[in-house]
Image (spheres, helix red, strand yellow):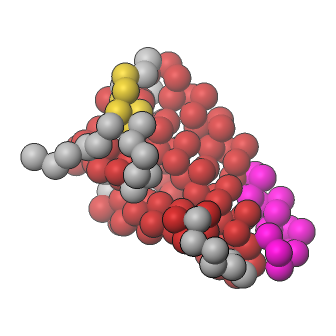
Amino acid sequence: MVSIGKSKREERTRAARYHEIGQALLQTAGDLDALADPRYGNALAIIAIHAAIAFTDALTVKYRELKSTDGDHTRAADLLVHAMGHRADADQVRRLRGILSAKSSASYSGNFYTLADGVRVLTETRIYAQWSAEMLQERL
């Protein structure tokens, strides 16, 4: 059995709020991208990563009434697989793992993300967000 990390119970009705937060963060990241300031690479990536986390919370709450509380954000992907079972698309889980793995680098490593680096994370998050929205609709 795969460990899902630390999690807590959340009412299924809260899934919509997490999705709304993800959408707001995704819009904010898009706004930073539109400014095209090279200094915003890290900020753009960090906001996009947090959007992906919110979309993941929406899915895990909707499908299994669980939300990751693990300090290691990459564990959210394990919880997603647990919550969605066979509906967890392998490509999207890989995409999420890639997005989440960028968190330490963009946030804590002291590495400078170029605007292009941030846009890459944003692009992956937009693809993941679309899939997330489709999966939430499927679970109505």
> What residue is at 75 percent from the left and 52 percent from the top?
27
> What residue is at 26 percent from the left and 43 percent from the top?
4
> What residue is at 72 percent from the left and 43 percent from the top?
24
- Start-end of magenta stretch: 27-40
Residue 44 makes an appearance in the image: yes
Residues 4 and 59: in front is 4
Coordinates of residue 62 in the picture (x, y in percent): 42, 30
In the image, is residue 44 above or below residue 1? below
Tally the marks: 0
Residue extending farthest left: 1
**Dominant SS type (magenta):** helix
Quadrant occupied by the C terminus = top left
Q: Which quadrant would residue 67 be assigned to in this image?
A: top left
Residues 123 and 7: in front is 7
Relative placement, left or right, of 30 versus 77 is right
Q: Which quadrant would residue 98 be assigned to in this image?
A: bottom left
Residue 47 counted in the magenta span: no
Relative placement, left or right, of 74 versus 116 is left
In the image, is residue 7 above or below residue 22? above
Coordinates of residue 83 in the picture (x, y in percent): 29, 38
Residue 84 makes an appearance in the image: no
Coordinates of residue 101 in the picture (x, y in percent): 45, 66
> What residue is at 78 percent from the left and 52 percent from the top?
28
Residue 33 counted in the magenta span: yes
Coordinates of residue 56 in the picture (x, y in percent): 46, 45
